[in-house]
Amino acid sequence: MEACEGKIDKEWVELIMTAKQLGLTIEEIQDFIRQSKTGLKIGQIPEHHK
């Protein structure tokens, strides 16, 4: 995905709006994005938490 300064990616907006409609909090969305950036699977416990 290419980011352009000053422009909003419509797919990201749709994704976040859908997550909010499902009742997810901003923190949960941010955690999911952080996990996906680090390659963790949903529900997987990071090594430093084991």
Image (spheres, rainbow, N blue to C red):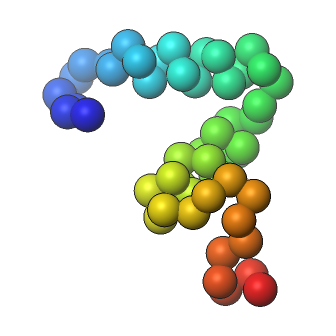
Q: Nearer the viewer, residue 32 or 7?
A: 32
Q: Is residue 31 above or below residue 50?
A: above
User: Which residue corresponds to the image point at 71% horizontal and 65% vertical from the top-left?
Assistant: 44
| Image quarter of the N terminus | top left
With 9 as the anchor, is 16 left or right in this view? right
User: Which residue corresponds to the image point at 22% horizontal and 22% vertical from the top-left?
Assistant: 6
Q: Is residue 30 above or below residue 50?
A: above
Q: Is residue 31 above or below residue 17?
A: below
Q: Position of residue 20 (x, y in %)?
A: 71, 21
Q: Position of residue 7 (x, y in %)?
A: 25, 19
With 2 as the anchor, is 21 left or right in this view? right
With 22 as the anchor, is 37 left or right in this view? left
Q: Is residue 35 above or below residue 7?
A: below
User: Which residue corresponds to the image point at 64% horizontal and 16% vertical from the top-left?
Assistant: 18
User: Which residue corresponds to the image point at 77% horizontal and 86% vertical from the top-left?
Assistant: 50
Q: Position of residue 24 (x, y in %)?
A: 77, 31
Residue 29 placement: quadrant: top right
Q: Position of residue 48 (x, y in %)?
A: 67, 85
The mark tally for this picture is 0
Residue 26 placement: quadrant: top right
